[in-house]
Image (cartoon, helix red, strand yellow):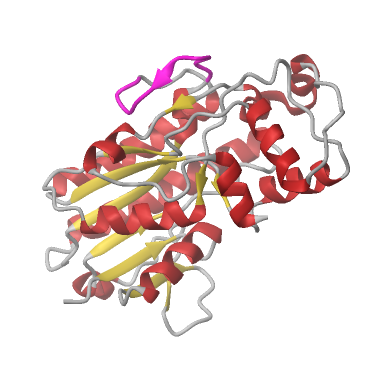
């Protein structure tokens, strides 16, 4: 029997990747969006509490990817937007499921962030590791708490703590590749900070794997490669990809903090995460090595 999947926040890169993958595997996929353009798009507005309740009677799985882009400048107002854009859609989905007893949703998959752990140096981090104390960590905690309410409705709820997804259209990948081609890649500080990542083909395979995983209870998953890599490792991988030695000196950490403020933690935090729950469940990565992953996408 074909499963029906509803993706909130599905108009972004990750939503598009998941939708394309699931459609190719013959899932029925609809996208919740404020700007519907395709026949499979469904209009909603989480800020105005606009939601088509009837779709819940034809949906088996909801995947919630809603959230504003972290790559913009973190002004005081934009930090509020980062929180609101994650909480409001999740809260609306919870409320609609709670108020609509005829819904057919059996599984809720919530996107979250690997940044929840904060700067933990060399410590190996599995899913049970506690959250950090900075703005980004608290943002992730609030996001997850909102989604966990859906568990109380008797719906299996999985939390995906997603690492940067390596894809040709990813802003980080494009910038790093461009700089590497001109010998301009350089680490921040020591360059020993661990940087979790996942190849986009593994990412969509993980989502389908969890959709089909036969377990009654939801789980929190680190979505990252099983092999840890430092900033220096990534630079060496880009060197191999473009066949050019990078010669730029390291950028002092303090300069990054002065210029980027709180947002600097995206470059300075060390998160040595492991996808323990995924591996325990039996998932096998197609791209576990960074050199192999970059070769596939560049």
Q: Please name the residue shown 32% across and 42% down the image.
A: 159
Residue 27, how many percent across, how many down?
30, 74
Q: Between residue 237 and residue 101, name the one nearer to us.
A: 237
Q: Is residue 143 left or right of residue 251?
A: left
Q: Between residue 25 and residue 68, name the one nearer to us.
A: 25
Q: Quadrant of residue 274?
A: top left
Residue 86, how many percent across, how many down?
45, 46
Residue 34, how many percent across, how many down?
50, 68
Q: Please name the residue shown 47% across and 32% down the image.
A: 227
Asked if 203 appears above or below 288 in the picture, the reply is: below
One can see residue 95 in this view: no
Q: Please name the residue shown 33% across and 38% down the image.
A: 221
The residue range painted magenta reads: 119-129
Residue 50 is one of the magenta-drawn residues: no
One can see residue 165 in this view: yes
What secondary structure characterizes most of the magenta part? loop
């Amino acid at each position: 029997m074909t499963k029906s999947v509803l993706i909130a926040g599905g108009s972004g890169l990750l939503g598009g990747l998941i939708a394309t993958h699931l459609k190719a595997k013959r899932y029925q996929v609809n996208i919740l969006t404020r700007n519907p353009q395709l026949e499979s798009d469904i209009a909603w507005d989480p800020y105005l509490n606009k939601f088509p309740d009837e779709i819940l009677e034809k949906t088996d799985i909801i995947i919630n990817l809603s959230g504003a882009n972290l790559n913009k400048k973190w002004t005081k107002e934009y930090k509020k937007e980062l929180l609101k854009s994650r909480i409001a859609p999740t809260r609306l989905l919870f409320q609609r499921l709670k108020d609509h007893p005829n819904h057919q949703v059996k599984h809720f998959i919530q996107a979250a962030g690997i940044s929840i752990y904060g700067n933990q140096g060399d410590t190996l981090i599995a899913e049970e590791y506690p959250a950090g104390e900075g703005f980004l960590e608290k943002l992730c905690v609030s996001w997850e708490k909102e989604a966990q309410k859906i568990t109380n409705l008797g719906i299996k709820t999985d939390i995906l703590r997603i690492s940067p997804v390596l894809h040709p259209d990813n802003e980080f990948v494009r910038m790093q590749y461009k700089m590497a081609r001109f010998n301009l890649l350089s680490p921040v500080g020591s360059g020993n900070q661990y940087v979790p990542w996942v190849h986009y083909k593994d990412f969509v395979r993980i989502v389908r794997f969890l959709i089909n995983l036969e377990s009654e209870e939801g789980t929190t998953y680190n979505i990252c490669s099983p092999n840890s890599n430092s900033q220096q490792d990534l630079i060496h991988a880009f060197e191999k990809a473009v066949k050019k030695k990078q010669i730029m000196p390291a950028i002092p950490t303090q300069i990054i903090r002065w210029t980027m403020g709180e947002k600097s933690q995206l470059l300075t935090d060390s998160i040595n995460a492991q996808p323990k729950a995924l591996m325990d469940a039996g998932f096998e990565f197609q791209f576990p090595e960074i050199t192999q992953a970059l070769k596939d996408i560049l």
